[in-house]
Image: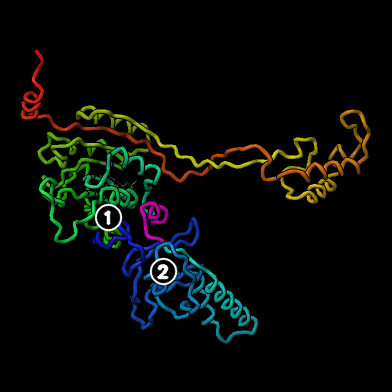
Amino acid sequence: TPQHSSFLHCGPIAEADSFAVLHLKRDLLIPTVLRAHDELDEGYSEGKVSNTRFGSFPHSTLIGVPWGSQVRASTVDTGSRGRKGWEGKGKKRKRNEESQGQGDTAGVEKKQNAEIENKTAIEATTGFVHLLPPTPEIWTASLPHRTQVVYTPDYSYILHRLRARPGTVLIEAGAGSGSFTHAAARAVYNGFPESGTEVSSTQEPAEKRRGKIWSFEFHEQRAQKLQQEIKEHGLDGVVKLTYRDVCQDGFTPDDTPTSEVKANAIFLDLPAPWLGLKHLNRTNPSSPLSPTTTIHLCTFSPCIEQVQRTINTLRSLGWTEIEMVEIASKRIEVRRERVGLAEEGLRGVNDSPASVDEAVGRLREVEGRSRLFHNEEEEPGGAQVSKQQRLENIRSALEGRKLYKEGRLIHKAEPELKTHTSYLVFAVLPREWSEEDEKLAQGKWPAKV
Ligand code: SAM
């Protein structure tokens, strides 16, 4: 339930049955549900075990630990117990299986196996992970991809433009791998009233202010997998996932009265969003849109032809403020590049030497290539100096330098961008203006005479 969702509120420590992420390194994250009891009930007190390339992590060493802690691998070789069904069935278990199978073979193999075992034990006792609470950003980086996904730079901007905030009711299709779903669930989640809390008469009942994601996916296996993840992550009170073709059947789940949906934000990540738009129209009697608020919409399409068709349909259905945006996220690395000695006429000796001796050593090495070492040269002012003298000059010039301060600042754009570049179309459907509204407005703002 949302009360137990570490995605929505993780608390200070990692609790049993909460969803957690084992951070091995920047690009290696293992999501897991912390379990105090081994699913196979093999009688070990360590609970479930996450087996990683940095060692084994019995969940008894993770549960009750403050989020963000560094946790060392188990010194107990849990990997040799021959369990089934644990995560990250890694090399270690394979090696153990292999070594068991080869028990009494030739001495060389035995020795090799012993070395492997020994190495494994060392890795297991020296490795560590950081225990992190899950966030949509971490989930996006570690989720099993079943489709292209919406990445953080895109969904943060989209949710901002959709005005997604606690209490927002958002329709999403297709749900795909659930990357956007998780970010949207956090954005609209409003918390739940403590039991027994009085709702003040000036506020809407808390139930009404609760945000919700009405999510749709027409690929059966994807829908099933996502449903399982939503449940495991405790998001089932916030996200209602329905398996259906929205272009054909619209955006109201079969078991829900149309009047219950009342969405005020829409995100369509579909190959043909224009086909779904006809259902998102207030004149349609089964419209899932809120009748009393402005609706903000975003579609996400890789091709400009899709954008054109979407915009044409939006125009014909009375949407306003139609705009297309493309997010080009770039990480810029800023660093100092030393002006090499090359630029000072000493080719072959540039920014790499960290010390004076190294610089001078390299000068000697490149003697053959440098005109400095071929001929005696004239110093500015006309004096003839020997090679030895020149080396001494360089040495004293280098000695006075603060190497870390040298060079000019440069910046480089990181070439690889982890974002699925698509065109984002935004549009607004103003709230319906009724005769009553008009009368009210006339009464409030009488025409000037
Ligand atoms: N937004 C998702 C995410 O962040 O993980 C990725 C969505 S994926 C690019 C598009 C999904 O739309 C696919 O899983 C596809 O099965 C689904 N889809 C396509 N047409 C659909 C339709 N008419 N109704 C429901 N789902 C549809």
> What residue is drawn where x is 36% and y is 65%?
13
In the rendered structure, which amino acid carries the disc numbered 2? Glu
Residue 87's spot in the image, x, y percent? 41, 69
Please name whichever residue, 444 or 118, is drawn nearer the observer in this view of the structure: 444
111 is within the stretch colored magenta: no
Please name whichever residue, 446 or 32, is drawn nearer the observer in this view of the structure: 446
> What residue is drawn where x is 27% and y is 39%?
163
Distance CA(mark 2)–CA(mark 1): 23 Å
From which residue to which does the magenta span run?
132-144
Residue 78's spot in the image, x, y percent? 46, 78
Answer yes or no: is residue 180 visible: yes
Please name whichever residue, 268 or 134, is drawn nearer the observer in this view of the structure: 134
| Residue 99: quadrant of the picture | bottom right
Query: Quick one: label 2 or label 1, which is nearer the N terminus?
Result: 2
Mark 1 crowd level (few <14, some 14–19, many ≥20, 10 Å Cα): many
Answer yes or no: is residue 30 visible: no
